[in-house]
Amino acid sequence: MDTLLTPITHALASVLAGAHSLATDLGLASGSASAWLLAIAAVVVTVRSLMLPLVVRGVRDSHARAKARPQLLALQERYKGTRDPERLQRMRAEQKKIHAEHGVSTWGIAPMLLQLPLLLALYRVISDVTAGQGVGALDAGLVASATSASVLGLHLSSRLGSAFAASPSAGLVLVAVVVLSALLSFATQRWFALPMMDPTGQPELMVQVQQWMPLVGAVGVLVSAAFVPAGLIVYWCLSNLWTFVQQGLVWRFAPTPGSPAALRRTGTTARA
């Protein structure tokens, strides 16, 4: 896996090194926390921008599936309980026809899978740098510069326990970033993701699980933050901020048909 990710990690390391160089050209002190924070933000923007076509594809596919859902539910009801091979084959043929009619992709999970190499490579770069290891264009000098940069005593390589041990102010800064990241995760799921899910035809247990997902995601961020360096937490926070804005735009302008978000938008449009 490391060998497969090497070209991607080196490309991302070049972006990080180039963004730091640009930050210093803009007047920020070389090796300063602000320069490295800007560099991390540049990497997040680069990666998430590259993933936008996959996001658009995913939104289109969710719309197609939502439009096909009523016909698929009716089909399942019509063939409910059948075990006859011939009837089951007929049902699959009709299902395939409905998918083709609405443009439902048979590779619905592909966009998510294609994102994984980029996300894993980005995680590896940030993790290696905050651990003091060089990656591609990030040589020993740049890595030392990144790990020595600090805000109120908080370094990119600091962990929650060591941050409080070094300075209460550093620990509080890190806690604030962790809490902000968790809140962004919760708000994204609660305000934008849940309202775009149509519970029609779903088992009650599945609906209940979906209701718990915002809290589970936020708790996951809080727990994980105790074991990773500050640089990764900063990356999480910036990435969660991007996701919050991105999902908010989808919720506002392209909600899933039949979902509460779509009904809300239709009602708003009707009153306008």
Image (tube, grey):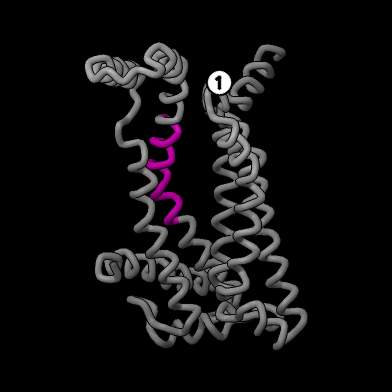
- In this rendering, the answer to whether 124 lies above or below 55 is below
Query: Label 1 amino acid?
Result: Gly
Residue 52 visible to the viewer: yes
Local secondary structure at mark 1: loop
Residue wearing tag 1: 258
**Magenta portion: prevailing SS class:** helix
Comparing 142 with 171, the one in front is 171
Residue 224 picture location, percent across and down:
58, 67
Quadrant (top left/top right/bottom left/bottom right) for the C terminus: top right
Quadrant (top left/top right/bottom left/bottom right) for the N terminus: bottom left
Query: Where on the picture, by quarter, is residue 105?
Result: top left
Comparing 75 with 185, the one in front is 75
What stretch of residues is rendered in magenta?
46-60
Residue 107 picture location, percent across and down:
31, 36
For the point 34% across and 58% down, the residue is 117
Residue 219 picture location, percent across and down:
65, 58
For the point 63% across and 17% down, the residue is 266
For the point 45% across and 30% down, the residue is 62
Residue 100 visible to the viewer: no
Residue 122 picture location, percent across and down:
42, 64
Comparing 116 with 22, the one in front is 116
Q: Is residue 168 left or right of residue 224?
A: right
Does residue 193 belong to the magenta stretch? no
